[in-house]
Image: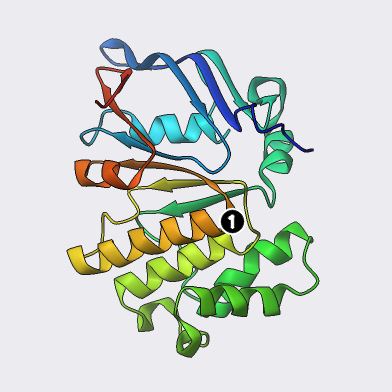
Amino acid sequence: MNIPAATPVIEARRLRKQVTGPEGDLVILQDVNLEVYAGEALAILGASGTGKSTLLGLLAGLDTPSGGSAHLFGKDLGSLDEDGRAALRANRVGFVFQSFQLLPSLTALENVMLPLELNGSDRRAEQTARESLVRVGLTERTRHYPHQLSGGEQQRVAIARAFAPQPQVLFADEPTGNLDPGSGRRVIKLLFSLRDEHATALVMVTHDPELTAWCDRGYRLSAGRLEPVE
């Protein structure tokens, strides 16, 4: 499905999320409106516990809203069941997480190959994975297991895994949160280099306001509402 350039790849309208707890309803997000276009980089700022990860999950179709709508590639996520949302994301959406989420029993190469093989879309999964690891500077680490890699190297494996299918959208949840400042800067440069190379839309949630300088737009999430950063 080809989306016209003028059509957002991600769109949220009056998006709302609330949960019920011992003390009643807790509103996490309310009336969130957002559009993201192909190739854009967007930063969503906010302190821990403000709902940044919840918003990311709603935009990616990993969670369902209490109200409003979220569209991905022009498709209303609320009109799809779990399998339909997974099929929509396949090979088109990548994820990078603060905790890396590498499988400890797999080598770096096998971790990058895994989503390609699961999607059944790439008969050259090993070659594609190797090329992706070369791109992130890990040519000599293909046979290493996660526990044999530094935090920065593990995150680079995670980035290679996310970009291997050449996704149209990449969601990054605190991608530098577990890294030292030097490794964090290298990871950010790599993310944006790959974003430019593949024209991937990048949506990143972070508590670090300095990252807005890398992005086309920035928003701050506070009290459940999303406001532009001037």
Q: Where is residue 69 in the image (x, y as percent from the top left)?
A: 57, 16
Question: Along the horizontal axis of the image, is 88 left or right of 208?
Answer: right
Q: Nearer the viewer, residue 107 or 159?
A: 159
Q: Which of 178 and 21 is in front in this view?
A: 178
Q: Is residue 143 above or below residue 166?
A: below
Q: Where is residue 169 in the image (x, y as percent from the top left)?
A: 57, 44
Q: Report the coloring of the rendering.
A: rainbow
Q: Is any atom of residue 62 visible in this view?
A: no
Q: Is residue 20 above or below residue 209?
A: above
- Of the 4 image quadrants, the one containing the N terminus is top right
Location of residue 74 by image quarter: top right
User: Residue sitting at 20 percent across and 34 percent down?
Assistant: 47
Helix, strand or loop for disc 1: helix
User: Residue sitting at 72 percent across and 38 percent down?
Assistant: 83
Q: What residue type is labelled 1?
A: His
Location of residue 28 by image quarter: top left
Question: Along the horizontal axis of the image, is 14 left or right of 179?
Answer: right
Q: Position of residue 35 (x, y in %)?
A: 51, 25
Question: Along the horizontal axis of the image, is 73 left or right of 58?
Answer: right
Q: Which of 125 and 118 is in front in this view?
A: 125
User: Residue sitting at 45 percent across and 54 percent down?
Assistant: 96
User: Alpha-carbon neighbours of circle 1 within 10 Å: few (<14), some, or many (≥20)?
Assistant: some
Q: Where is residue 227 in the image (x, y as percent from the top left)?
A: 30, 19
Location of residue 198 by image quarter: bottom right
Q: Is any atom of residue 21 visible in this view?
A: yes
* Residue position for label 1: 198
All told, the count of numbered labels is 1
- Of the 4 image quadrants, the one containing the C terminus is top left
